[in-house]
Amino acid sequence: MSTAPAAPWRRPAPTTGQRRADAWIALAVAVLALFDLALARSTGAFPFGTPPSLAEQIWWSLAVTVPLVWRRRWPVATTVVISVAFIAGQARAIPLTNLPSGALFAALYTLGAWGPDRRTAGRVRIGVIVAMFAWLGLALALRIDDLSAVAFTGAAGPVPPLLAAIINGVLFNVLFFGFAYYFGELSWLAARREHELRTQAEELRRSRAEAAERAVIGERVRIARELHDVVAHHVSVMGVQAAACRRVFDRDREKAGTALAAIEQTARTAVDELRRMLGVLRDPGGAETVRSAAAGVEQVAELVENAREAGLTATVGVYGEPVPLPRSVSQAAYRIVQEAVTNTVKHAGATVLDVRIRYLARELEVDVSDDGRSGKPPGGGGLGLIGMRERVAAHDGVLEAGHRPEGGFRVRARIPLARERSA
């Protein structure tokens, strides 16, 4: 499946504050350029020849500096306008020196830093630099005779004075335009990296929020499963005991008393289990303590005893050599047996219940079967069977649940032990 390439990053347009700052900077540069022009006129230094009228000199000085107002909003147009005005002003012998040169530098830098189209920004900058060097070469060629006639008083170096002046001018312009290009590109790269960092930080924030939400959902599912296992089992046993008590209450008070005692004990056990679960909800930091105190496979006999008290012929068998189990495996096995016993008491209409715990070479097998005559699967396909599958899947085990050919229902779970032991 192919995906469209991501669009190249474009620097966001300047903010209102940045445009306002550009306007103030352009105004300050224009004023200083006029002051620089006044100083040049006062010294009488006109390197490009006799200048035109004062009004025209002011006009070209402003033409080179004022466009800086739009340098970040329209960087391409600003750079082109300032470059053309700079060359035209020098061609008209305007003494454009310090401030106008700084305006040209700022325009080239801004185009590199803010140009929305990188290809266009690069081409325009290179075109302007080439044009500037072409103009420099043309100006030198036109004034070579005048420069040759200049007496370089005090010249004592190994390089001819005229050649040294030309090399110095070329070197200055190489550094001038090179720095403008380099720092503009560097600014754009820094802005892109800042954008990428912000994007990654936002993605990380969303990822953390999603992970936290998944953790909350997972914990809710776990708590719901625990509550279902605890409440459904004990309430089902109490319901069966209450029904038995009601049937024999008038005929056999002793059996009724035994049933009531079982109901009382089961209710207390259910309350204790609920208190442990509520402890997890009230104090998340104590979750591990509560889990470590939860029932395990060693309490399976109590479940079978409850089934006997509910009127079933129930047996439990442990096969193989018992080995220490990880707490999570022991608890999962206990909950699976608990749910299967609850379903048998509640739904199956069974008279016989058989629970077997097998310690195999690399697995723990839990096998619960009954002789129920109900055609309805235990749990009715509800939370009970789903909870058992979730518990087994959490340990990469296998769960089989279904009707037996000889009648009744069987739940068998196999939980691997080899990886648990090596963990």
Image (spheres, grey):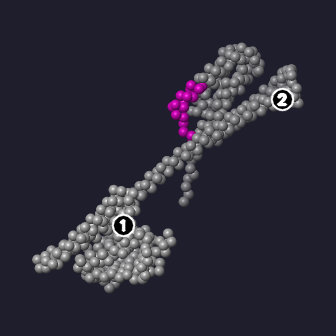
Secondary element under disc 2, as helix, strand or loop, is helix
Residue pushed farthest left?
250
Q: Quadrant of the N terminus?
A: bottom right
Under mark 1, the amino acid is: Ala
Q: Determine crowd level at label 1: few under 14, some 14-19, many 20+ residues with C-alpha closer than 10 A.
A: few
Under mark 2, the amino acid is: Ala
Q: Does any portion of residue 16 appear in the rendered image?
A: yes
Q: Is residue 66 magenta?
A: no
> Looking at the image, which is closer to me, 160 or 336?
336
Number of numbered discs present?
A: 2
Question: For residue 136, which quarter of the picture?
Answer: top right
- Residue at the spot 56% in from the left edge and 46% down from the top edge: 196
Q: Which residues are magenta?
A: 10-26
Q: Is residue 407 left or right of residue 30?
A: left
Q: Residue 132 appears at what percent x and percent y?
A: 73, 31
> Looking at the image, which is closer to me, 382 or 285?
285
Magenta span: predominant SS is helix
Q: Which mark is residue 164?
A: 2
Q: Which mark is residue 117?
A: none
- Residue at the spot 73% in from the left edge and 23% down from the top edge: 91
Q: Determine crowd level at label 2: few under 14, some 14-19, many 20+ residues with C-alpha closer than 10 A.
A: few
Give how far apart the Cα atoms at labels 1 and 2 are.
Answer: 91 Å
- Is residue 202 placed above or below 84 in the rendered structure? below
Residue tagged by mark 1? 293
Q: Residue 351 appears at what percent x and percent y?
A: 25, 82
